[in-house]
Image (tube, rainbow, N blue to C red):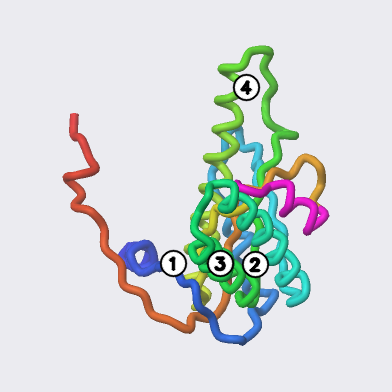
C-alpha cells in the first residue's frame, strides 16, 4: 500500500528532458495503463496520438505557436510577452522526445434530444479522458520518465487535428510531453483543510 502513495506523492510535472529517446515499449505500457482508467458507461472515449518524429514535433509546435501568437496579438499583449510565450511553448513541445496528444471521441457516448443532458454527456467524456491522463502521468513516473500535462490543444484543436491528421471525431484535449528528466522539481500543496468539507 505504501508504494502507490509513493507514486501518487512523488510524481511531478517535468518540462525539461534529455535527448534520450523514449522506448516504444514504455510508451505502450503507459498507454495501456491509461486505458484501464474508469470511464462513463465504460465507453472509453479517450484517444491517443503518439508523436516521436522530430520533424512532426517541430511542425506541430510551430503551428500551435502561430495560433498562440495570433491569439495574444488579438489580446493586445506586449510584443515581448508574446514572443516569450510562443518561444516557451515551442521549446516545450519540440524538445520533448515524445508527445502524446490526448483526444476524446463522442462516437460511443449516449445521445440525447436536449441540451442539458447532451452537455452532461460531453462532460462525462471529458472527465473520463482526464482520468486516463492521470493514469498516463503516473505510469510515466513508474517508468522513470518525466511528463507534463499541457492543455494548449484546447485553444487550437483545429490546428492540432490538422497537423496530426486526426480522425474527424477526435477532439484534442491535452498534450503530454514525455522524456527522461533533465530537471528535478519540488512542489507544494495547499493545506488539506482549505480544500475539504466534512459533513
Taking the spot 61% from the left edge, 75% from the top edge, the residue there is 96
Q: Which mark is first along the chain, 3 or 1? A: 1
Residue assigned mark 2: 99
Residue 81 vs 171, above or below: the answer is below
SS at badge 4: helix
Q: Which mark's residue is nearer the viewer, 3 or 2?
A: 3
Residue assigned mark 1: 13
Residues 138 and 64: in front is 64
Residues 16 and 132: in front is 16
Q: Which residues are magenta?
A: 154-165
Cα distance in 3D space between marks 3 and 2: 23 Å
Q: Which mark is first along the chain, 2 or 4? A: 2
SS at badge 2: strand
Q: Whole-percent x and y of residue 57? A: 71, 70
Taking the spot 64% from the left edge, 77% from the top edge, the residue there is 97
Taking the spot 49% from the left edge, 63% from the top edge, the residue there is 81
Amino acid at each position: 500500500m505504501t508504494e502507490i502513495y509513493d507514486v501518487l506523492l512523488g510524481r511531478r510535472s517535468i518540462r525539461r528532458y534529455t535527448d534520450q529517446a523514449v522506448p516504444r515499449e514504455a510508451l505502450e505500457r503507459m498507454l495501456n495503463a491509461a486505458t484501464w482508467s474508469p470511464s462513463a458507461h465504460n465507453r472509453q472515449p479517450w484517444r491517443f496520438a503518439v508523436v516521436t518524429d522530430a520533424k512532426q514535433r517541430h511542425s506541430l509546435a510551430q503551428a500551435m505557436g502561430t495560433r498562440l501568437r495570433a491569439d495574444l496579438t488579438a489580446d493586445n499583449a506586449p510584443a515581448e510577452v508574446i514572443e516569450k510565450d510562443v518561444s516557451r511553448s515551442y521549446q516545450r513541445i519540440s524538445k520533448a522526445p515524445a508527445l502524446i496528444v490526448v483526444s476524446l471521441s463522442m462516437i460511443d457516448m449516449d445521445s440525447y434530444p436536449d441540451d442539458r443532458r447532451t452537455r452532461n454527456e460531453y462532460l462525462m467524456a471529458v472527465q473520463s479522458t482526464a482520468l486516463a491522463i492521470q493514469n498516463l502521468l503516473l505510469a510515466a513516473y513508474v517508468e522513470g520518465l518525466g511528463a507534463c500535462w499541457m492543455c494548449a490543444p484546447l485553444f487550437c484543436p483545429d490546428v492540432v487535428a490538422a497537423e496530426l491528421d486526426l480522425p474527424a471525431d477526435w477532439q484534442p484535449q491535452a498534450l503530454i510531453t514525455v522524456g527522461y528528466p533533465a530537471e528535478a522539481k519540488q512542489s507544494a500543496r495547499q493545506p488539506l483543510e482549505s480544500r475539504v468539507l466534512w459533513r
